[in-house]
Every structure is written in structure tokens, then in C-alpha cells.
Image: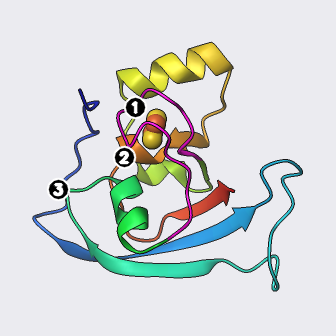
Amino acid sequence: MRGSFNKIKMGTSKKAEIQVKFLDSKTGNPLGSGQDEYQSVIGEASQEESLLDFFVKRSVPINHSCGGMGTCGTCLIEVENEELLQEPNEIEMELKRDRGLDRHERLACQNYPINKLKIRIRI
Ligand code: FES
């Protein structure tokens, strides 16, 4: 069963621009040219899809071994401005306890896309 999403008040659908930077999964170094630049991912966002769904639908590379069920932890992202997100749900809290994650580390499958998020993805 899919985990429960954090609830946000954002209406039915809004345009969201999310800034994404890719990091090497082993070294943590930025990938590609313009290494300090974030790339914009723009699209309609709603409570009908998770941040993971938003990325997958737009061919943004992101790991998601369990397909968004909240069990694998491979969709872990670093959110620079995590204060825009709701508090972590039970699934995220359990992962944070088990792995000792910090407050910037969140699961893409357990959160909604929100305009102006700045996210680092390890691939
Ligand atoms: S895709 Fe498995 S925990 Fe998010």
C-alpha cells in the first residue's frame, strides 16, 4: 500500500517550477556542466501526484526502486528549502530514525511538488 502523503493547501492544480541539481551518488559532486546551476522543471502540480510522480512524468532521472510505495528509500532527495514542505509523515520519520537522516533529506514519493522547491538529486 502506498504511504500517506503530506497534505498541503494548493488547490486542484497549479503551475510549479522546481529547481533541480544532480549530484554524483558516490562522491556527492555536482554532475554536468554549469555544476552550480539548478535546472528548472516546470509543470502542473496537484495533490493527485507526488513529487516523484512529477519528476518521472517529466523524465527527470530519480531512483525509485519500490515505485513510490515508501519502502525503499531510494527516492531520497535533499531539499534546500524544506520549510516549504509539510512535516515528515510516519514513513519519512521512520526512515529518518533508521538512517539518521537530517531535516533536508526527504522522500520524493511522500511529498507533493511545490513551487520554488530547490532539490538536489543523487543519481
Ligand atoms: S520510491 Fe521507494 S521510498 Fe520512495
Q: Please, what is the three-letter code of the amino acid marked with disc 1?
A: Gly
Gap in angstroms between the C-alphas marked 2 and 3: 11 Å
Disc 1 Cβ-to-ligand 1 distance below 8 Å: yes
Q: Which mark is residue 111?
A: 2
Query: Does the segment drawn in magenta span residue 85?
Result: no
Q: Nearer the viewer, mark 2 or mark 1?
A: 1
Q: Is the Cβ of the residue at disc 2 closer than 8 Å to that at disc 3?
A: no
- Label 2: element kind: loop
Q: Residue at x 82, y 85 (%)?
A: 33
Q: Position of residue 62 (x, y in %)?
A: 55, 57
How many numbered badges does the structure rendering display?
Answer: 3
Q: Which mark is residue 121?
A: none
Query: Nearer the N terminus, badge 1 or badge 3?
Result: 3
Q: Which residue is mark 3?
A: 48
Snapshot quadrant of residue 53: bottom left
Magenta span: predominant SS is loop
Residue range in magenta is: 60-76
Crowd band around label 3 with a 10 angstrom C-alpha radius: few (<14), some (14–19), many (20+): few
Assign ligand 1 to one image quadrant.
Answer: top left
Q: Please, what is the three-letter code of the amino acid marked with disc 2?
A: Asn
Residue 28 sits above or below residue 105 on the image: below
Q: Quadrant of the N terminus?
A: top left
Gap in angstroms between the C-alphas marked 1 and 3: 16 Å
Query: Does the segment drawn in magenta span residue 68?
Result: yes
Q: Residue at x 12, y 63 (%)?
A: 11
Q: Residue at x 35, y 69 (%)?
A: 57
Q: Which residue is mark 1?
A: 70
Disc 2 Cβ-to-ligand 1 distance below 8 Å: no
Q: Position of residue 66 (x, y in %)?
A: 43, 36
